[in-house]
Image: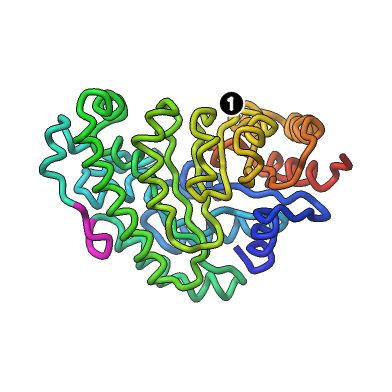
Amino acid sequence: MNDEQWNTLGAVIQGKTLPVLPTGFIIDSPWLPCWAGSSILDYFTDERVFFENNIKAIRTFPKTMFLPGFWAEYGMCTEPSAFGAVTVWEENEFPFAKKILRSPADVERLEKPNPRKDGLLPFVIKRLKRLRPEIEESGHKIRFAVARGPLNIATFLMGVTEFLTAIKTDPELMHRLLTITTDFLVEWIAYQRECFPTIDGILLLDDIVGFISRRDFEIFALPYLKRAFSPDVTVKFFHNDAPCKACAPLLPDIGINLLNFGFQHTLTDMKSWTGNKITLLGNIHTREVMAAGTPADVSRSVVEMLKALEDRSHLIVSCGGGMPPGVPTENIEALIAAVENFQG
């Protein structure tokens, strides 16, 4: 993100009224390399491909924000790799991390990784360090420390069904697991901030909170997310495009001030559930409209969404989740233009 975009983001989070509603998108490996004309594996393994793909998106859509910006991730495998998860790679498929915990009892032998040395984490840092001069020459800066959330990592290590079952059958072991993943996250976020002093935001992605009840969220998610989001930064950005109704009222208590959520909920509902204390990034349907619709479909959806919203503060227009695979240039341009042309 460049300085103007970062200032716009800060203004929206503060609830300021802007002449035109901003737009922004989470972009990473599910969409960016295929859109830019490279393979997914080349995007992960060739830093020139990574840089050129990101620059191409920035130059093609100069009127929108890309969050977090130059995201040097390795799919869902970045954090699990530090715990020793085997990562499976294919040329044009998303990488997959094999689980390493076969039973709740295996948590007893789990060790907290060192983010400076373990798994793919040093590769993330090295890639950004090498590219930082070019990123800054392009007018942008590394603004966010990025990681999967504590529950998300836990489910990659032991499986979603297994983890959700174990919070009922073996709660003490699951608290131990979440303590380990959170301790690791705190160190990983701190290390990213140490390496890049321009970081003034945290992005955590954790869809698993959408699969548990409010009570379970209070017990198994809230304290760990609150600790992960504890650093003193300007933007505390949370992504959960699974159902958010149960956890939404509690997100402001964690300190979260920017939320990307799924298309299952309306902006009006989310504003109500969060007390309008969080800036929302959404909420056009990802697959049916952004990926499979026409530019006219996108424009119509944007207008309908904004007309239905009485309070348009704390809003960045986007899709309901990260940019999905297959979204064409024309549809992104249509969304940006529809927001610019909207007259209320």
Amino acid type of the residue tagged 1 in the rendering: Gln
Q: Is residue 51 above or below residue 304?
A: below
Q: Give the residue number, with chain letter if any, for mark 1.
A: 264
As drawn, 338 above or below 115: above
Q: Is residue 199 visible?
A: yes
Q: How is the image coloured?
A: rainbow
Q: Residue at x 47, y 56 (%)?
A: 202
**Extent of the magenta region:** 112-118
Front residue (pair 218, 106): 218
Tell me which secondary structure the magenta stretch mostly adopts. Answer: loop
Position in image of residue 126 (x %, y %): 35, 68
* 268 sits to left or right of 176: right
The correct choice, above or below, for 274 with respect to 81 in the image is above
Percent coordinates x, y for residue 288 in the rendering: 62, 26
Which residue is depicted at the point 39% across and 71% down? 195
Of residues 30 and 163, which is closer to you in this image? 163
Q: Let me know if residue 37 appears in the view.
A: no
x then y, percent, for residue 1? 60, 62
SS state under label 1: loop
